Image (tube, helix red, strand yellow):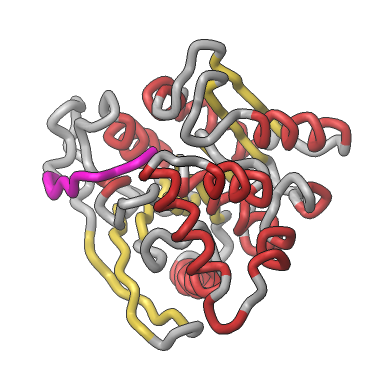
Amino acid sequence: MLETTLILSLCAGVLADEPLPEPERHTFNCTADGSLWPYLEQAAPGDAAAVLVYLHGHYGDEYQGMTVGTYDDAFGRLRDECARRNWVYVCPWYGGNTWMGPIAEQGVADLIGVLRERYPGRPVYLCGGSMGGSSTLVFATRRPDLIDGAIAVCPAGDVEAYYRYVSESQDPTLQNIAAAIRIHYTADGHILADELAARSALRNAERLTMPLYLIHGAQDTVIPVDGVRGLAARLKDLGRPVLYHELPDGAHDTPVLRINWAEALDFIAEGQ
């Protein structure tokens, strides 16, 4: 999901029966670069039962997942579902168009540390769409001990193969994605080929032990379905808790429009 327009309308609840909790803005320290990174937090109306962290897409920021009305109100529906369950809902900025490179990985780990300290004993789940879904899979692969479940919407199931795909494309957006991956994966002297291999969920599927909900469109040309299709099959072979929906007529944004958030949140919470 590519977000090219920053929408600051956070008037929560305009499409719901009850007003949503107003999100609060916070910052945390990213220990990888020593800078303060922002995030928005929608508090649970009652005693917090869990924490859900949403990772934005390419060109997006911390406002994307809090903005009601876009993508058939996908995020308004997600916010409402979190509030109904007394889940804390958190939307961070994680370094720009990082595709979960090494610095972003440490930053998200730092944020989860902050959230676990604030909400001790509560499960922490991760989700996102497009770059955010891809980054969710990368983080889950790299730091499986830090999250209790994950939702990946239209993600690159194999960022290693996906980088080859975007690198060979003449499409300006895909060229931009290739450049972003190359820049962020080689930060601080990291070797691109090593990082691509280490961050591929398909290559490292055995590390994905948490409940994982996947949804993808079969007609997606921004992030082709092959990677996530292969990942879902591999996880099923490993006997891991995975639920995969493939939309036969779905383009890139279709899964965002059609996802059943109640089903997704139920699955990562229950693992079945």
| In the image: residue 72, left or right of residue 175 | left
Total tally of numbered discs in the picture: 0
The one nearer the camera, 161 or 218, is 161
**Image location (x, y in percent) of residue 159:** 63, 49
**Image location (x, y in percent) of residue 37:** 34, 73
Residue at image coords 46%, 23%: 260
Q: Quadrant of the N terminus?
A: top left
**Magenta stretch: includes residue 2:** yes
Instruction: Give the main secondary structure, helix, strand or loop, of the magenta stretch.
Output: loop
The one nearer the camera, 78 or 103, is 103
**Image location (x, y in percent) of residue 134:** 55, 47
The vertical placement of 124 against 31, above or below, is above
| In the image: residue 40, left or right of residue 234 | left
**Image location (x, y in percent) of residue 262:** 47, 27
Residue at image coords 38%, 50%: 58
Residue at image coords 71%, 33%: 242
Residue bounds of the magenta highlight: 1-9
* Viewer can see residue 143: no
**Magenta stretch: includes residue 136:** no
Residue at image coords 79%, 37%: 235
The vertical placement of 138 against 243, above or below, is below
| In the image: residue 91, left or right of residue 217 | left
Q: From this viewpoint, which residue is outermost toward the bottom?
A: 34
The vertical placement of 15 against 104, above or below, is above
| In the image: residue 214, left or right of residue 204 | left
Q: Quadrant of the C terminus?
A: top right
Q: Quadrant of residue 246?
A: top right
* Viewer can see residue 50: yes
Q: From this viewpoint, which residue is outermost toward the top?
A: 249
